[in-house]
Image (cartoon, rainbow, N blue to C red):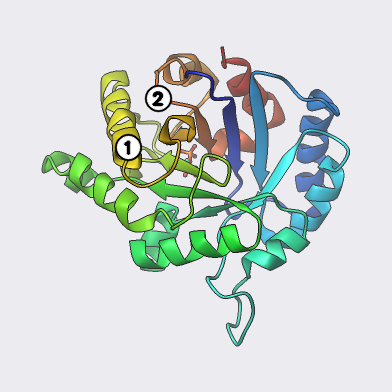
Amino acid sequence: MTGRRYLIAGNWKMHGRLQDGTALAQALAEKLGPNGDPRFEILVCPPATILSAVSAVGEKTALLTGGQDCHAAPQGAHTGDIAAEMLADAGAGYVIVGHSERRQNHAETSAQVKGKAAAALRAGLKAIVCVGETREQRDAGQAAEIVAAQVAGSVPEGATADNCVLAYEPVWAIGTGLTPTIADIAAMHSMIREKLRGLVASPEAVRILYGGSVKASNAAEILAIDDVDGALVGGASLDAGSFWAIAQACR
Ligand code: 13P
């Protein structure tokens, strides 16, 4: 972490109804207040159904909100899909694209993820581009190669440190309680930064988040790694206390 402000992002996935979602956002908004904390930014990505309400709760505070996915097109005959412009209209400043649950459950390719990330930029949103290998790929010694290809294939033209964040989430670490070793996370993040040097302007300023079983008890050692600039948190982001405790681990 050299000069980059940490981003602690909560991916609520398919959790959260109006009442509990706004209550969770309210608790975080109260902790952040209008000025937030100089060490970190806090982002929550609720289901699209409550994005407007959650954004309204955070409006006069430093709480940031985002979507979990978007379509590449600005509008059209795409039943059930959501345009990046619609997320912006609902108050979002960010959108997650290429999460492994989208890549796996919806067979999204890196080319499609790149189209979604480009749509985010077009809509004035910041894209959080997710990459990560499966257990089989890691066991076969292919993790670095797979992640490098995902980065090269998913980061859109025009990406900068201001509009694009990377998130390394090993698929086998998501929701399992397992995490790579500190050395493995460090090696992957440094490889991703190296890859970004050929892809974006000011690669040193791009934030690279780690995601996969981040919790209060392991956050400090993960967030202390040089090229780890924040966390993308699933389960532990659903409780204000545990999510806030992760943010408190930022140096
Ligand atoms: P968990 O923190 O529940 O492992 O989820 C990580 C994740 O997928 C965040 O996008």
- Gap in Å between the C-alphas at discs 1 and 2? 9 Å
Q: Residue furthest left?
A: 140
Residue at image x 74%, y 55%? 51
Q: Is mark 1 within 8 Å of ligand 1?
A: no
Residue at numbered disc 2: 227
Q: Residue furthest front?
A: 201
Q: Residue furthest bottom?
A: 77
Identify the element where label 2 is drawn: loop
Query: Residue 109: percent from the left, percent from the top?
Result: 34, 65
> What is the three-letter code of the residue carrying label 1?
Ile
The answer to whether one can see residue 109 in this image is no
Toward the viewer: 74 or 50? Answer: 74
Where residue 95 is drawn, which disc sits there? none
Residue at image x 41%, y 45%? 200
Residue 200 vertical placement versus 191 (above, below): below
Q: Is mark 2 within 8 Å of ligand 1?
A: no
Query: Residue 244: percent from the left, percent from the top?
Result: 67, 24
Q: Residues within 10 Å of mark 1 (few under 14, many from 20)?
A: many
Q: Quadrant of residue 8?
A: top right
Looking at marks 1 and 2 on the same chain, the residue that comes earlier in the sequence is marked by: 1
Residue at numbered disc 1: 192
Q: Is residue 110 left or right of residue 156?
A: left
Q: Quadrant of the C terminus?
A: top right
